[in-house]
Image (tube, rainbow, N blue to C red):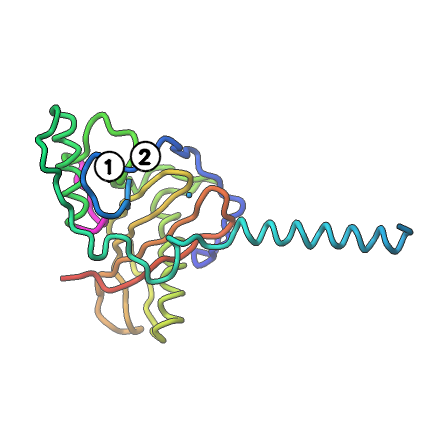
Amino acid sequence: MDPKSSDVDTIEPEVMDASCSDLSSSCGKRKAETISPDEGCEEEERDSESDDQGCEEEERNSESDDQVWGFDSFEGSDYESPDEPPEDDEELELRRYTRHYHESQGFKVDKDKLPKYLTYGLRGLDLDAHFFKPNLTGREYMEIMANVAIDKYNQVENKTVTLDHIVRVVVQMSYGIKGYITFMAKESPHGELVEYQAKAERKAWQRNIHPIFCRPAPS
């Protein structure tokens, strides 16, 4: 498979967690990042139906408001803990976890910060484990997602950034897959490696991966 292709029509996720709920209500977030009739006339009618189906397909595959290029839903959204004390240890764990991934704007989630009971939200991806059919590892699929974002970045910014290797990935699995990808890249053919971040998403009903942003990682 071409790692720069955004067309992943033949790739279906093994697991789509449709139980993801908005953590903002329980954790005091300002923006919900976490945690979707004659022979000639009959021919003309068939063509019209085909056009309608094409429009429906295009609509299903078009980007949503939260997939607009350059949109970072974490920007200007610092975590604010609720004034009232947590009701129990689970809520306290959830607040710590939410503050933790806000600090990296979603690009880092340590395993020890992930609540044991949590079945949704942002979590680190095992890059070497099987991830998507047909027989793609997490690393291989995220290389595809990263290259989609890099291609868009190069086009918009008139750059020549190329992917060298994936460093880590945080994913949100809910009605699709959203990847927060940290990677090393070269800004010129003989340039030094520079750390970059990319965010891309493919919702379950979309055929293509949609790039959201690509940028040098903040220091």
Spot occupied by residue 42 in the image (x, y as percentages of width and height): 85, 50
Give the main secondary structure, helix, strand or loop, of the magenta stretch. Answer: loop
Location of the C terminus by quadrant is: bottom left
Q: Is residue 110 magenta?
A: yes
* Residue at the image position 34 percent from the left and 34 percent from the top: 20
The kind of residue on which mark 2 rests is Ser
Q: Residue furthest bottom?
A: 158
Q: Which residue is mark 1?
A: 25
Q: Dot 1, how many residues are within 10 Å of its Cα: few (below 14), some (14-19), or many (20+)?
A: few
Residue 16, quarter of picture = top left
Left or right of 213 on screen, residue 82: left
The residue depicted at 90 percent of the width and 52 percent of the height is: 39
Q: CA distance from mark 2 to mark 1?
A: 9 Å
The residue located at (21%, 34%) in the rendering is 26
The answer to which quarter of the image holds residue 65 is: bottom left
Q: Is residue 96 magenta?
A: no
Find the magenta span and give its range. Answer: 104-111
Q: Identify the residue position indicated by label 2 in the image.
A: 21
Q: Please, what secondary structure does the residue beneath circle 1 have?
A: helix
